[in-house]
Image: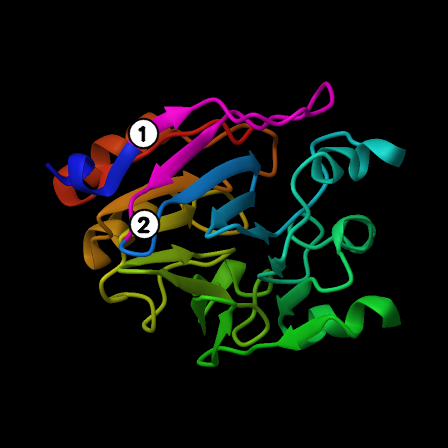
Amino acid sequence: MMQKHLWTAGFVALALSLPAGAQVAGSDHIATSGGPVDIVPIHHASMMLAYKGAHILIDPAPLDGAQGDAVTAPYKAMPRPDFILITHIHGNHFNAPILEAVSGPNTLIVAPQNVRDAMPAALQAKVRVMKNGDTGALGAVPVEAVAMYNTTPARMNFHPKGLGNGYVLTFGDKRVYIAGDTEETPELEHLRSIDVAFIPANLPYTQTVEAAAKWVKDFKPRMVFPYHYRNQDGSTADMAAFSTLVGNASLVRLRKWY
């Protein structure tokens, strides 16, 4: 019943002409009181959301092994984003050449302060800085910046507290949470009324599959997309195990991120 009410079309082909090697597998559609939201996985932590004619690009970064023009080509082939959200400064989430290639004259970029500071001046002029706890709007979409950091002592140097943002976006009556690189923190343990969540599970930078599943069972989003699950050694985390561990706490959607 959960799936029937939340999803109108499941997983369908996306009509985009992408260059060879681009790993956009398709789009999912969420029914909301304000109209449908299309969710398009791109790679690792990169995705595009479309709602009411606006396009929101999340953490655009190079596909594996991309060099030269291939860095920007997959993103230039997609609709020009009206808004871009950057969670933090790491190169698999933030890439200035991609932002320069896809930003239009009216594109708004939302990012933490240290990400803005690392941009060329022309990009800085497009940025609205948000920190944990800030709220704002991307056109018709309210946005809240939330905590994003490591809590395990051996990993705390990867993502220190206060330097990155997760984001909660509200599309009509549906709330979508994009975690970025984080573990379950006290602030995130009981996120309220999340309909769709994007949760990372890779080592050593975020968390284990077991920890990710435990977190999902704590805050119980109606649906969860595991993403950002390639480990430092090139292996991918066991998403089948993640699904089993989550059980009935949330509907798990496995998509092609690699």
Q: Nearer the viewer, residue 105 or 199?
A: 105
Residue 154, image x, y percentages: 51, 59
Residue type for callout 1: Ala
Q: Residues under labels 1 and 2: Cα distance? A: 15 Å
- Give the residue at mark 1: 9
Does the magenta-highlighted stretch encompass residue 138? no
Name the image colouring.
rainbow
Image coordinates for residue 195, horizontal then vertical, percent: 27, 53
Q: Residue furthest left?
A: 1
Secondary structure mostly taken by the magenta-highlighted segment of the chain: loop
Q: Is mark 2 on a helix, strand or loop?
A: strand
Q: What residue type is labelled 2?
A: Val
Q: Can residue 67 be seen in this view?
A: no
**Dividing the picture into quarters, in which one does residue 119 lie?**
bottom right
Outermost residue toward the top in this view: 20
Identity of the residue drawn at 66% across and 65% down: 109
Residue 74 position by quadrant: top right
Magenta span of residues: 9-32
* Left or right placement of residue 138 versus residue 75 in this view: left
Relative to 197, 117 lies left or right: right
The residue indicated by pointer 2 is 196
Q: Does the magenta stretch include residue 12?
A: yes
Q: Can residue 184 be seen in this view?
A: yes
Identify the residue at image location x=86%, y=69%. 122
**Which residue is at a point 39% across and 34% down the rendered structure image?**
28
Vertical position of residue 195 compared to residue 224: above or below: below
Residue in the picture at 69% in, 45% down: 61
Secondary structure beneath disc 1?
Answer: strand
